[in-house]
Amino acid sequence: MRNSSKGFTLIELVVVVTVVAILYTVFLNRIWFYQERAEKTAMVEVAGALQSALIMQYGRLMVRGREAEVTALAADNPMRWLQKAPTNYAGEFYDPQPSAVEPGSWMFDLKSKELIYVLNRADYFVPGKDGQKWVRYRVNLIYDTVKGVRGKGAKELVGTLVEPVEPYRWFE
């Protein structure tokens, strides 16, 4: 009669450890991917809140007959329009570098008049022309040509947008 052992063989142990290591690696990679997607979503949500605040500022000025002041919105810090700035808003800087703030933070560039979000997770982010891992937003005023006297077209302000300075994208 043969004496059977009730333990694992070395080969079985190696196979189990290998499978667990592979699952762990795949799981960690997916967690980082989803953390980056959550950060992107949060950034887009803040930009959306800023767009809504800009529309309210634009409407307030137009209703009060202060159309001439609308152009100043393009140079203003959009974070001032919010009831409360996000907790990750670091403030205003003059010609900043991404290292000026903690990753995952917003800042306003006083030189270029752009609102900047410095990414925390950027493994799947494709940087713009400057090669930095940040997304820059600017307030753009939208004009439309209105036919005036003798066929000459005049420009009329028809809207405002908070939009990225240059397109950005993430790998999926």
Image: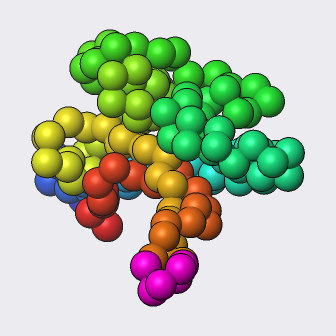
- Image quadrant holding the C terminus, namely bottom left
How many numbered marks have been drawn onto this rendered protein structure? 0
Residue 38, compared with residue 85, is above or below; it is below
Q: Position of residue 164 (x, y in %)?
A: 39, 52
Q: Can residue 35 be found in the magenta stretch?
A: no
- Image quadrant holding the N terminus, namely bottom left
Q: Position of residue 23 (x, y in %)?
A: 32, 55
Is any atom of residue 156 visible in this view? yes
Q: Position of residue 149 (x, y in %)?
A: 53, 80
Residue 76, compared with residue 126, is above or below; it is above
Residue 152 figure quarter: bottom left
Q: Residue at x 25, y 37 (%)?
A: 133
Residue 66, compared with residue 120, is above or below; it is below
Highlighted range, magenta:
147-152
Q: Residue at x 56, y 23 (%)?
A: 88
Q: Residue at x 20, y 36 (%)?
A: 132
Q: Is residue 43 left or right of residue 46?
A: left
Q: Can residue 149 be found in the magenta stretch?
A: yes
Q: Residue farthest to the bottom?
A: 151
For the residue pair 50 and 88, the one nearer the viewer reads as 50
Q: Residue at x 81, y 48 (%)?
A: 65
Q: Is residue 150 left or right of residue 128?
A: right
